[in-house]
Amino acid sequence: MTEPLPLSLLNDHLYCPRRAALKIVEGWRGANVHTERGDIVHEHTDLAGYESQISDSGAKIILLRALPVWSERLGLSGKCDIVEVELCSNLKLEISNLKSLKPVEFKLGKRRKWENDDAQLCAQALCLEEMFGVAIPGGAVFHADSKRRREVEFTPELRASTERAIGDLHALLHRSEVSNLRSEIPRPPPAVWTPACEECSLFDICLPKATGADGRAERLARKLFEI
């Protein structure tokens, strides 16, 4: 059975397919000021546990932290930063007592819509729906810098694009596995230079200006073996 892909890799893939390939195919990991700040932001949500609250309407809300989630259908696994659980009654937390579930993802930066963040959140909801059999119409992204929350509706279009991205990610891994079986060196997608590259934790490994679509580095490498 194929190992499930990590949910967080979906965000990487939509940010940059080459970044995802460097992580999953070549096993690279990197750190910079953004990843370190991200670790600080997730310091609380990474501690598994729960909290109880009462909503304005008097309903009991349970906040589940670092909840493991998975989907056999999609071949995904990971965890949700926060899942807000509304219960049908103020009884204990049981599947039969679930009224609604809402995943909440913590992100750096100011309140702004990003396709990769919304897809990652939607993938969490798809996992939760499969696990608990409860329809999840939306979730939320909490932006740490602005301390503002952005609601995300899981529209049919977002669900479809999320599943397509998951399929692309599995295809990327499959191509790498085929290359290994053929004793070939797996080739990550070529770099496409953008200003966002300088913010990437794998910038010094990727070298996007040298390995870009113009193939400059590849041509130089071939010349080394020319007679």
Image: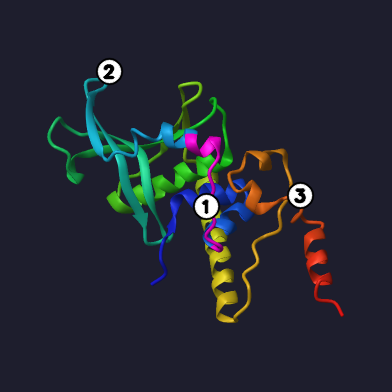
Q: Of circles 3 and 2, which is in front?
A: 3
Q: Secondary structure at mark 2?
A: loop
Q: Which residue is mark 3?
A: 209
Q: Magenta part mainly helix, strand or loop?
A: loop
Residue 60 visible in image: no
State which quadrant residue 212 falls in. bottom right
Q: Nearer the viewer, residue 11 or 125?
A: 11
Dot 3 or dot 2, earlier in sequence: 2
Q: Which residue is mark 2?
A: 56
Q: How many marks?
A: 3
Q: Is residue 216 left or right of residue 192?
A: right
Dot 2 or dot 1, earlier in sequence: 1
Position of residue 175 measured from the top left corner of the image (x, y, whole percent): 59, 70
Q: Which residue is mark 1?
A: 29
Q: CA distance from mark 2 to mark 1?
A: 43 Å
Q: CA distance from mark 3 to mark 2?
A: 53 Å
Identify residue type, mark 1. Arg
Query: In the image, what residue occupies the spot 18% across and 40% down?
Result: 97
- Circle 2 residues within 10 Å: few <14, some 14–19, many ≥20: few
Identify residue type, mark 2. Asp
Residue 28 painted magenta: yes
Q: Which residues are magenta?
A: 25-36
Residue 114 sits above or below residue 96 on the image: above
| CB contact under 8 Å: marks 3 and 2 | no
Identify residue type, mark 3. Lys
Q: Is residue 149 left or right of residue 186?
A: left
